[in-house]
Amino acid sequence: MKTNDVILKTTSHVVFFIIFLFSIHVFLAGHFAPGGGFVGGLLTSSAIVLLLLVYDLKTVQKLLPINYTIMTASGLVLALGTASIGMFLGKPFFKHYFDHFYLPLIGDTELHTAMLFDTGVYLVVVGVTLTIIQSIGGDD
């Protein structure tokens, strides 16, 4: 039997967004400071696990209708594809490429292939973590 804990439900909404926004910050800062796709993915997973603790599995699946298996596969393809770019260009596996681009709203910015790789890692970590947690939590 679940209790109707109003304080936990109310604070979890605020804390969820704080953790999620911090995970995006850690993900984006991972190229120049500690962090990146792995740590950002774990933080995002922990934010969703907080929702799973407050609500039940079916409610969270209605709030976030995400197929985590497809997310994991997409992240794996993105990470391996990004790491393999160098091989197709006659360079070593995991060769890092970057250049400066002008983006309309941001201005002059430097884009890296490491960002694509980190995005793949982020998706794999979130997908695998939540697939495991939902498979364990879904058992009756």
Image (cartoon, helix red, strand yellow):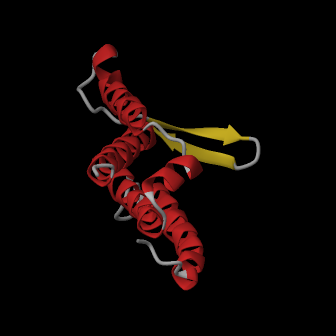
Residue 89, image x, y percentages: 34, 16
Quadrant location of residue 56? bottom left
Residue 137, image x, y percentages: 31, 54
Q: Is residue 104 left or right of residue 26?
A: right
User: Is 13 above or below relative to 83?
Assistant: below
Q: In this view, does 104 lie to the left or right of 118?
A: right
Q: Which residue lies furthest to the bottom in this view?
A: 7
**Number of disc labels:** 0
Residue at 36% in and 30% down:
73
Residue at 45% in and 64% down:
47
User: Is 68 above or below relative to 40?
Assistant: above
Q: Residue furthest right?
A: 104
User: Is 117 above or below relative to 105?
Assistant: above
Q: Residue furthest left?
A: 92
Residue 7, image x, y percentages: 56, 85
Residue at 41% in and 71% down:
1
Quadrant location of residue 65? top right
Q: Nearer the viewer, residue 11 or 120?
A: 11
User: Is 94 above or below relative to 135?
Assistant: above
Q: Nearer the viewer, residue 26 or 106?
A: 26
Q: Nearer the viewer, residue 75 or 89?
A: 75
Residue 30, image x, y percentages: 40, 57
